Amino acid sequence: MKMRMLEEDELFPSTPGKVKIERVNHRQFHRCFASTSTMFLWALFLVALTASYLSFQSFVDTSSRYLSASWGGLHWEKQIRASAQPHRADAAGISVLVTGAAGFVGSHVSLALRRRGDGVVGLDNFNSYYDPSLKKARKSLLSSHGVFVVEGDVNDDKLLAKLLEVVDFTHVMHLAAQAGVRYAIENPASYVHSNIAGLVTLLEACKSADPQPAIVWASSSSVYGLNEKVPFSESDRTDQPASLYAATKKAGEEITHTYNHIYGLSITGLRFFTVYGPWGRPDMAYFSFTRNILQGKPITVYRGKDHSDLARDFTYIDDIVKGCLASLDTAEKSTGGGGGGGGGVKKKGPAQYRIFNLGNTSPVTVPTLVSILERHLRMKAKKNVVEMPGNGDVPFTHANISYARAELGYKPTTNLDAGLGKFVKWYLSYYGYTRGRKNV
Ligand SMILES: NC(=O)c1ccc[n+]([C@@H]2O[C@H](COP(=O)([O-])OP(=O)(O)OC[C@H]3O[C@@H](n4cnc5c(N)ncnc54)[C@H](O)[C@@H]3O)[C@@H](O)[C@H]2O)c1
């Protein structure tokens, strides 16, 4: 052992010399030979290791792809069927696929349907436009009431085809969308993805389903754009959108008309006017004002160019839900044949096509909204009043709801004061505040 160590020392002299080098060369032949074979073995070992790593990696990839598609399988189908099963005593229950079910309006509509005994399956991609934990909390609430929410995108045609194959949905309540006006400056593609491409993917799936479901979907009061005739009626012009959001909703109205015309899909479009209430959207003014007031932070209040106050026809969520349920209940059946697409889906006759305003018919200015919030929160707001930037917001909205009243029996009953009181109560309990002090 000692000898061997000496040899090693010789092989690697600290000061190289000719003699030594010659001696070294002689011995190096054996050393080289030995080291080449060792290297060969090492190389072989490394190749084998790399190969097994790669095959393991591809296995992991395949499995994660399979797992990340968090839908499919017998158990999943069983959950879908159970959730879609109506439980109404009068046997008149409907089965509704609610897209955007983890969203503000979607969660309320899903719950209301479930409470009256209808079958509901939700679909939502839980995107991070605003805090996804709020969407997860809404999902938990729905799940505690027996509503199953599938995590998926409305652009996933295979998922939609599967859902419509597993259940003969009588209706689709399409509420999934990229909402919000100002976010389009930052992420215009998200509006095209969800509000245009997603809508077409959904309509394609519905047109091919057999039976075809009737579709009720959310358009928006924003389609009235620069229209100045008040109150806004369904027959008013909607060809002057002021934002990309509005333009995608207007496009949605034209696209749904096409599918109604060609394939006989029964379509009801609902133009919601500034919906607010418990479990609402954090990106909306009443919500962010509440948060900032409670945290002692300033709020930005926009004013029109001529110093006029902005006004909105704020509509309480329960009134919107009643309008949605009435739309589902009065929707006629689709008239297309369903079954496979490929241009072979013929309608048997004209199908219903409707568009309704769902508003409150009493616009309230933003400063009034702030003072109502101050009263409910028992705290003063620090206001920064600035001129409204030209980023898509319109100065006022005001709905004429006579058509919805006549056809749907729609009659809003909650004024802004009462509705904000309920919102503030929810907000304080959800975020754990007591009288302006955060508990958690
Ligand atoms: N809240 C309002 O004041 C208001 C006013 C007019 C119109 N609307 C419309 O009503 C509908 C519901 O609005 P909301 O206020 O509940 O908004 P929301 O953002 O709370 O709900 C929309 C839900 O859709 C989901 N979603 C978005 N893109 C999706 C996609 N590609 N695939 C699957 N899920 C997707 C989101 O994750 C979200 O949970 C939307 O179509 C919106 O444009 C709302």
Image (cartoon, grey):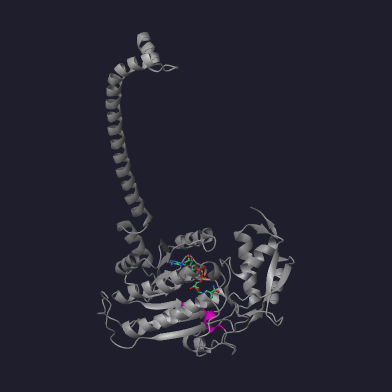
| Location of residue 171 in the rendering, given as x and y in whole percent from the top left corner | 38, 75
Q: Is residue 12 above or below residue 271?
A: above
The part of the image, by quadrant, that contains residue 227 is bottom right
Q: Residue at x 59, y 60 (%)?
A: 430
Of 52 and 401, which appears nearest the observer?
52
Residue 267 shows up from this direction? no
| Location of residue 358 in the rendering, given as x and y in whole percent from the top left corner | 53, 81
| Location of residue 111 in the rendering, given as x and y in whole percent from the top left corner | 47, 68
Region rendered in magenta: 218-225
Q: Is residue 356 above or below residue 301?
A: below
Quadrant of the frame with the N terminus: top left
Report the number of discs. 0
Q: Residue at x 45, y 80 (%)?
A: 251
The part of the image, by quadrant, that contains residue 169 is bottom left
The part of the image, by quadrant, that contains residue 394 is bottom right
Q: Residue at x 59, y 69 (%)?
A: 284
Indicate yes or no whether the magenta region holds residue 5.
no
Instruction: Tell me: 58 left or right of 197.
Output: left
Of 287 and 298, which appears nearest the observer?
298
| Location of residue 138 in the rendering, given as x and y in whole percent from the top left corner | 50, 62
Residue 367 shows up from this direction? yes
Outermost residue toward the front in this view: 18
Of 225 and 382, which appears nearest the observer?
225
Q: Is residue 234 above or below residue 302?
A: below
Indicate yes or no whether the magenta region holds residue 220.
yes
Q: Residue at x 70, y 75 (%)?
A: 367
Instruction: Tell me: 78 left or right of 145.
Output: left
